[in-house]
Image (cartoon, grey):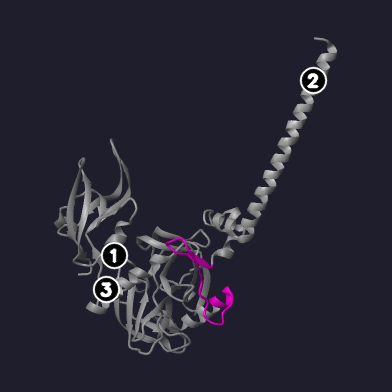
Amino acid sequence: MSEKANSLKSTSTLRKNIKKISCFTVLFTGIFLTCASFFGILWAGGWIQDAVCSVVLEDSYIYEKINCSENLVSSTTDDGGVIDIEFPEGVESTEELITTIIEETSPAVVTVAVSSLTFDINQGYVDQQSGIGSGFVVDSDGLIVTNQHVVSDENGEYSVFLPGEQEAIPVQNIYRDNVNDLALLKIDKSGLKSLKLGDSGKLKRGNLVIAIGNPFGDLEGTATVGYVTGLNRDVSASSGFFGSVTHYEGVIQTDAAINPGNSGGPLINSQGEIIGVNFATTQGADNISFAIPINRVKMQLEVFKKEGRFPQPYIGISYSQRTVILKDKVITGAVVISVEKYGPADKGGVERGDIIMKMDGKDLAEFSLQNIIQSAKVGDSIDLEIYRAGETVKFKVVVGDKGE
């Protein structure tokens, strides 16, 4: 083939390639502009922002840059629909909503104090009431909820200060629930303003919450605002520098600041309902605090009003709920470390070394054993499915009352 023919062939090929590239460029540009317009419409409508905010972590760069926090005043129902917060009449902003809730609920938040002898140069030793924690009224006839660790000294003399009042009201009776770190105080006072108890089972991460209490015992009515940042957390809390460590399961995590003295105060939702009892914060980390779900309180109050006491459901075992790797299988459950002699589990046939896989029909790979027990009533018969020596066996255990 001549040199001239080769040159013509190369020119023709080049023209074809340029034509193909031009067509591809036009097609790509068209697709890009169409997609950009489509996603622009979605972004303007807020759909992309909602989708991204629902999956990214709250402490991530993306979460901050696309202003996810602006969407947190709405909550999603179980059926996937979105419901807006129902603002009280005349309230038109989130700020007004928060200030209204604080103003309306603070009169029911009290200071829990303990009596102590202090030396005065003029009077000598005098009896003085010092604030040590918070609480809230759940019955207008003088029933107050707080944490058990706030009133843990059974020989202590406790009293309550109502908001804005200087006179201490002596606590007549204390009903303690050591397992859930709850206590019910009875004072001789009627006509008190009480708070409505919500449903902690409906909580979602991102729900707006308000913590009210008395930090350091004297900063009455302090309110902090945040969000639910975690659910069903398992935490260990100490009652003091040399105090015993208690393990709690299934508690609420929030970034609303909870300081010493806030213990026992309410965690309130955007409807002005209590959804938790504040009890602990984390040292060495910012904005990580915890609250006991209010549904546990509601169950205890229901029994208290019938029987006049706080029951403490238990089955009499110590355990470690974790995943166990065996030779031929992997099991997630509660490994029984010890069994209380003559306790409910011992009477039901449970032995040390058993792995409880299911309790009351609930798989312990998904549910907390402690939550299941605390949700039961004293006297209930609960089915246990246990892995023992290569076999699956079933037992029935009658829930006992640790307080008896």
Q: Secondary structure at mark 1?
A: helix
Position of the C terminus, as image quadrant, is bottom left
Gap between marks 3 and 1 measured at Cα: 13 Å
Q: In the depicted view, which residue is nearer to us: 76 or 222?
A: 76
Magenta stretch? Answer: 73-98
Q: CA distance from mark 2 to mark 1?
A: 83 Å
Q: Is residue 342 left or right of residue 230?
A: left
Left-right relation of 128 to 314: right
Q: Crowding near pointer 1: few (<14 within 10 Å), some, many (20+)? A: some
Quickly name the residue at label 2.
Answer: 10
Residue visible at 47% across and 86% down in the picture = 121
Q: Residue at x 73, y 40 (%)?
A: 26
The image position of residue 71, as x and y in percent, is 56, 64
Q: Which residue is mark 3?
A: 310
Q: Is residue 1 left or right of residue 254?
A: right
Q: Secondary structure at mark 2?
A: helix
Q: Are marks 3 and 1 in contact (CB under 8 Å)?
A: no
| Residue denoted by label 1 | 375
CA separation in Å, label 2 and label 3: 94 Å
Q: Position of residue 374 (x, y in %)?
A: 28, 64
The amino acid at mark 1 is Ser
- Judged by depth in the image, the label closer to the viewer, 2 or 3, is 2
**Amino acid tagged 2:** Ser
Q: Residue at x 32, y 77 (%)?
A: 184
**Callout 3 secondary element:** loop
Q: Residues within 10 Å of mark 2 (few under 14, many from 20)?
A: few
- Residue 172 placement: quadrant: bottom left
- Count of numbered marks: 3
Name the residue type under label 3: Phe
